[in-house]
Amino acid sequence: MVHRRRSGRSGLIPPRAGSPETLTTTAAARPSPSGPASAGSLAAARVPLAERVRLVAVEKAPRPEGLPAEIEWVDEIPQGVTGLLVGTEWLDNVPLDLAVFTPEGWRYLLVDPATGEESTGDPVSGEDADWLDRWWCSAVSDATGATTEGFRAARPAEGSSLTARSRSGRPEPPTGARAEIGRTRDKAWAEAIKRLDRGLALCVDYGHLRAERPVGGTLTGYRGGRQVAPVPDGSCDVTAHVAMDSVASAGERVARCAYTLVSQRDGLRALGADGGRPPLSLASRDPAGYLRALAAASAVAELTDPAGLGGHWWLLQPVGVALDPLMAR
């Protein structure tokens, strides 16, 4: 998405200094100077986890007051990480370009930064067109509004062609369909994976897969926790969901290890968090324990609600390690 009065493209909005959407928190265990532990170093393996792990937060904003001294604060992902790299709701704030489908094909969507008014710009470039053809143009709505493989129940606009084909030979989307070109997210995730020497990268974000791309896109704004119009004037956070399969493919090419993609709901349940209420009998035996268990169950229920946080995707990308079969299924 670009400013109407400028040439070129700039993404949704430039990241603001001090904004949490620029980079995400990273937890990492740095490699030991002596190298990885051997089979004979079992004593080292028994050192408490807190003494073996170094926590590093990656963020452009200044270090917050009161943050424990044990947590490092940097503005770039460290090189040579051995351990766990976590990106939570990071990629959905990485700027990207938007496109709209016209009778002449995909064109960039322009926006007035002061009012949010939209207009149609130049045809998309070759790389962006290739990305759209591979990752977004996977289906088309039929004349009844039903979807075939991707765009959700959206009736094609007047005069659109249901028989037109993309360069891949698949049906083209209806006129007026919008797309969020995720090449910048793919690149950001691939660059993050390159910083991981050995371990696991976990991306937690709202997103969608090629078979379920939303015909109208997902661009929106948030101000003070409330959804607002996505006007890129700096008064709100502008965000769009992530094409998770495209991001996963980009990371896999770097890591050369198969990834796992699951919903947060399924991931937490695989780890044993089901959100079930504790038995009422516990309330009479241990009232305080019952209240603690009830609070924990409520937290899990919120984290697994498919209409809320449970709608997050978990993308797990191992690098040089085997993923736990519990999460790899």
Image: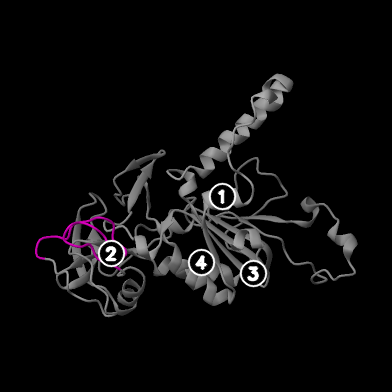
Colour scheme of the picture = one colour
Neighbours of disc 2 within 10 Å: few (<14), some (14-19), many (20+): some
**Residue holding disc 4:** 189
- Say if 291 sits above or below 184 in the image: above
Question: Is label 4 or label 1 in front?
Answer: 4
Sequence-earlier tag: 1 or 2: 1
Nearer mark to the viewer, of 2 and 4: 2
C-alpha span from label 3 to label 1: 21 Å
What's the residue at 72%, 56% (across, down)?
54
Answer whether residue 3 is visible to the viewer in this image.
no
Please tell me which of labels 3 and 2 falls first in the chain: 3
Q: Amino acid at mark 3?
A: Gln
**Residue 176 visible here:** yes
Please tell me whether residue 280 is drawn above or below residue 23 in the rendered image: above
Was residue 145 drawn as part of the magenta stretch in this picture? yes
- The percent position of residue 43, horizontal first and vertical second, equals 90, 60
In the rendered view, tell whether residue 6 sits above or below residue 129. Answer: above
Looking at the image, tell me whether mark 4 or mark 1 is earlier in sequence order: 1
Q: Which residues are magenta?
A: 139-159
Please name the predominant secondary structure of the magenta segment in the image: loop
Tag in front: 3 or 1:
3
CA distance for labels 3 and 4: 14 Å
Marks 3, 2: nearer the viewer: 2
Which residue does the numbered mark 3 point to in the structure image? Answer: 79
Residue placed under numbered mark 2 in the picture: 148
